[in-house]
Every structure is written in structure tokens, then in C-alpha cells.
């Protein structure tokens, strides 16, 4: 019996040892398979290559101001040719602005002035009317004053005085316009002259280079044409001011003529009422 139990115990130990060994081999096999799978699933290390730096796109430049653009074009057009054109613009604008201020100050409310003169003639006579016209600014009041000063010599002398002094006032109103018209014609001519001289310089550069290079031709023509553009722009600006001044003077002349006729009628009426 003891031998039987000893054999059973030995067989049991052998079985347990075999099972434990089998479990260990199974665990090792599983571990190996897991490692192999992990190794297969793990990507091969990629060789790190230095990243190629992409060129950074240059930031868009901020748009230039109008003043900066004009300055650049002035320099590109060559100051020797652009300066006379600029001088024409400055002097022409100065005269135009002075004329505009003067003509606006010379504008008179003729209806109100005639009503005041009529009241003065009715209440205080010619001397009172003279005080009114002398205290009023503008060419219409000056013509009235000259006409009233000849009242003692008759209506015909009043009319002649008004006509003569009206021509004087018209000349004063038109003073300076001849210079504006001169600069209107002179600025484009100076621009054309700069263009012609610039073209001659471009052909000289072609001759010196011995070859017709597009860059040389384009650069020379660009510089030459900038003076023409500048002259035309100056002429257009001054032409606008000139037309405004002419229209303003025509309006004042019409006011003077209408007011003068009305004044003569008032003086005739006042003379007959005496």
C-alpha cells in the first residue's frame, strides 16, 4: 500500500511538474509572440532628415501713401525737368487761390444794396447815397459811387462814368488770369520738352551700349514720359481753376451791368421826384 501511495505521489508530482513546465513554455511562447507582433507593428525608425525650411513668404508691403508715390515719381522723372513743371503748379495755384478769395470778397448782394441806396436817396439825397456806397465793399458799390459823384452833371455823365469805371473794375477782376493761362500752356510744353530730351538720352544710352536692350529702352522712355504726365496734370488742374475764375468774373460783370442800369433808373426817378 505504501508503495502504491508512493507511486501515486510520484505520478502526481510528475504530472504537476509537466503541467507547470507546459504552462511556462506556453507563457514564454505567448510572450515571444507578443514581442514579435509588437516588433512587427512598431514602424522602423525613420531617419531624421533636416527639415527643409520653406521660404517664408514676404509680408505684403503696406500700400504707399499718395505723397510718397508723388515723391517717387518726381525723382524718377528727373528733378531737372520736373522742377519747372512743379514751379508752374505752385505759382498758378497761388494766383488762382488769391483770385478766388478776392472775387468772393467782391461779391455783393446787389438787391440789398439797391434797396439801401433807394432809401438813402429818398431820405437824405445823393450825399446820403454816397455814404452808403462808400461804406460797402465790392466793385458794384465802387461803380455806384462814381455814378453818384457825377449826378450834378446830369444823367448822361452818370451813364458815361458808370461805363468807364465799369471797364476799370472789370480789368481789376481779370488781373492775374493772364498768368494762370500762361502756366496752363507752359506746363505741358515743359513736360513735352523733358520727354524729348529724355528720349534723346535713351537713344544715347542705346548707342553707348551698342545693343538695343529692352531694359535701357523701357527705363529711358518711362523717365521721359513722366515729365509729360506731370505737365498734363498741372495743365488740367490749372485749367479747372481758370474756368472757375472766368465764370465768377462773368457773374460779377453781369451783376455790375444789371445794377448800373437799375441805379440810373433810380437816379432818374429821384431827379424827377424833386
Image (spheres, rainbow, N blue to C red):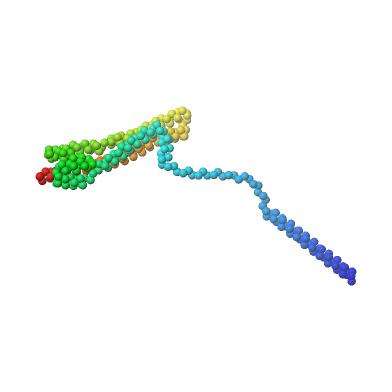
Q: Residue furthest bottom?
A: 1
3 up-or-down from 81: above or below: below
Q: How many marks?
A: 0
Q: Nearer the viewer, residue 262 or 213?
A: 262
- Please indicate whether residue 70 sits to the left or right of residue 17 in the image: left
Q: Position of residue 95 (x, y in %)?
A: 31, 37
Name the residue furthest top: 208
Q: Nearer the viewer, residue 69 or 24?
A: 69
Q: In this rendering, would 246 be left or right of 147? A: right
Is there any visible trace of residue 240 in the rendered image? yes
Quadrant including the N terminus: bottom right
| Looking at the image, residue 145 lies above or below residue 40 | above
| Residue 84 or residue 225, whichever sits in front | 84
Q: Quadrant of residue 175?
A: top left
The x and y percentages for residue 195 are: 39, 33
What residue do we see at 44% from left, 34% from top?
Answer: 219
Is any part of residue 188 visible from this angle? no
Place residue 107 in its image quadrant. top left
On the image, the x and y values in percent for residue 82 come to 39, 34
Which residue is at a point 74% across and 57% down the rendered structure image?
Answer: 32
In the rendered view, does 227 fall on the left or right side of 107?
Answer: right
Residue at image coords 39%, 32%: 81
Rendering coords of residue 167 (x, y %): 20, 37
Amino acid at each position: 500500500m505504501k508503495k502504491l501511495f508512493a507511486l501515486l505521489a510520484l505520478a502526481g508530482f510528475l504530472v504537476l511538474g509537466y503541467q507547470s513546465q507546459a504552462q511556462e513554455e506556453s507563457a514564454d511562447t505567448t510572450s515571444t509572440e507578443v514581442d514579435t507582433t509588437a516588433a512587427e507593428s512598431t514602424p522602423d525608425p525613420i531617419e531624421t532628415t533636416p527639415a527643409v525650411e520653406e521660404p517664408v513668404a514676404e509680408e505684403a508691403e503696406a500700400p504707399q501713401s499718395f505723397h510718397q508715390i508723388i515723391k517717387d515719381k518726381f525723382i524718377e522723372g528727373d528733378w531737372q525737368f520736373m522742377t519747372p513743371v512743379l514751379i508752374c503748379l505752385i505759382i498758378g495755384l497761388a494766383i488762382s487761390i488769391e483770385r478766388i478769395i478776392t472775387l468772393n470778397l467782391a461779391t455783393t448782394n446787389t438787391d440789398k444794396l439797391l434797396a439801401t441806396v433807394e432809401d438813402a436817396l429818398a431820405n437824405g439825397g445823393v450825399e446820403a447815397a454816397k455814404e452808403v456806397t462808400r461804406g460797402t465793399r465790392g466793385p458794384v458799390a465802387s461803380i455806384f459811387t462814381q455814378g453818384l459823384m457825377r449826378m450834378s452833371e446830369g444823367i448822361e455823365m452818370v451813364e458815361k462814368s458808370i461805363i468807364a469805371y465799369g471797364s476799370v473794375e472789370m480789368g481789376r477782376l481779370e488781373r492775374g488770369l493772364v498768368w494762370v493761362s500762361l502756366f496752363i500752356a507752359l506746363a505741358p510744353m515743359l513736360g513735352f520738352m523733358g520727354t524729348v530730351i529724355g528720349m534723346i538720352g535713351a537713344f544715347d544710352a542705346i548707342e553707348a551700349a551698342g545693343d538695343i536692350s529692352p531694359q535701357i529702352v523701357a527705363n529711358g522712355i518711362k523717365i521721359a514720359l513722366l515729365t509729360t504726365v506731370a505737365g498734363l496734370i498741372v495743365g488740367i488742374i490749372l485749367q479747372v481753376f481758370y474756368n472757375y475764375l472766368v465764370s465768377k468774373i462773368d457773374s460779377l460783370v453781369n451783376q455790375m451791368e444789371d445794377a448800373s442800369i437799375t441805379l440810373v433808373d433810380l437816379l432818374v426817378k429821384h431827379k424827377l421826384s424833386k
